[in-house]
Image (tube, helix red, strand yellow):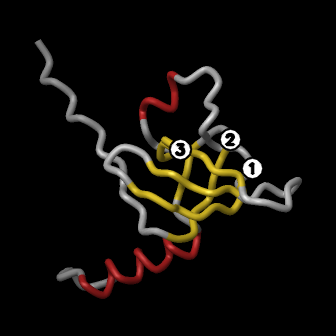
Amino acid sequence: MSAPQPKYRPPVPDLGPVLWFHVPGGEPSPAIVTRAGRDACDVIVFPPESRVGVPKSGVLHVNDPRARTMISPENGFWDFTNESKRIAEIYSALTSDKPSK
């Protein structure tokens, strides 16, 4: 008997800019997080074909395993911006006890 898999815990974004995807790996659109929850968040998406923001609720992180089982995800998926990822890497390197290579 195998050990149970730990439950996936998505990252929780700060309120502010993220990338929104209709499908994981698709073309991103800029978005702003308006509410962050433990499992999903609410965003306002700014797609290129629109002049107004489009609200989306219950948006999952792109690495959430539930993303693979959704046939037609209406709410889409979010991920951190490249800039946010770089800042997190720098912060981690600066606060790490290990010497850098």
Horizontal arrangement in the rendering, residue 5 relative to residue 80 (left or right): left
CA separation in Å, label 2 and label 3: 13 Å
Q: Earlier in the sequence, mark 2 or mark 1?
A: 2
Residue in front for this viewpoint, 19 or 55 = 55
Identify residue type, mark 2: His
Identify residue type, mark 3: Ser
Which residue does the numbered mark 1 point to in the structure image?
Answer: 27
Which residue does the image show at 70% across and 52% down from the upper left? 54
Residue 81, position as x, y percentages in the image? 58, 67
- Residue 1: mark: none
Which numbered disc, 1 or 3, marks the residue closer to the eye? 3
Residue 26, position as x, y percentages in the image? 71, 44
Horizontal arrangement in the rendering, residue 51 relative to residue 82 (left or right): right
In the image, residue 77 above or below residue 13: above
- Looking at the rendered structure, the secondary structure element under dot 1 is loop
Q: Earlier in the sequence, mark 1 or mark 3?
A: 1
Mark 2: few/some/many CA within 10 Å (<14, 14-19, 20+): some
Q: Are marks 2 and 1 in contact (CB under 8 Å)?
A: yes
Mark 3: few/some/many CA within 10 Å (<14, 14-19, 20+): some
Which numbered disc, 2 or 1, marks the residue closer to the eye? 2
Identify residue type, mark 1: Glu
Which residue does the numbered mark 3 point to in the structure image?
Answer: 57
Which residue does the numbered mark 2 point to in the structure image?
Answer: 22
Using the rendered view, name the quadrant where residue 3 is placed.
top left
Which numbered disc, 2 or 3, marks the residue closer to the eye? 3
Residue 95, position as x, y percentages in the image? 25, 84
Which residue does the image show at 52% across and 62% down from the upper left? 33
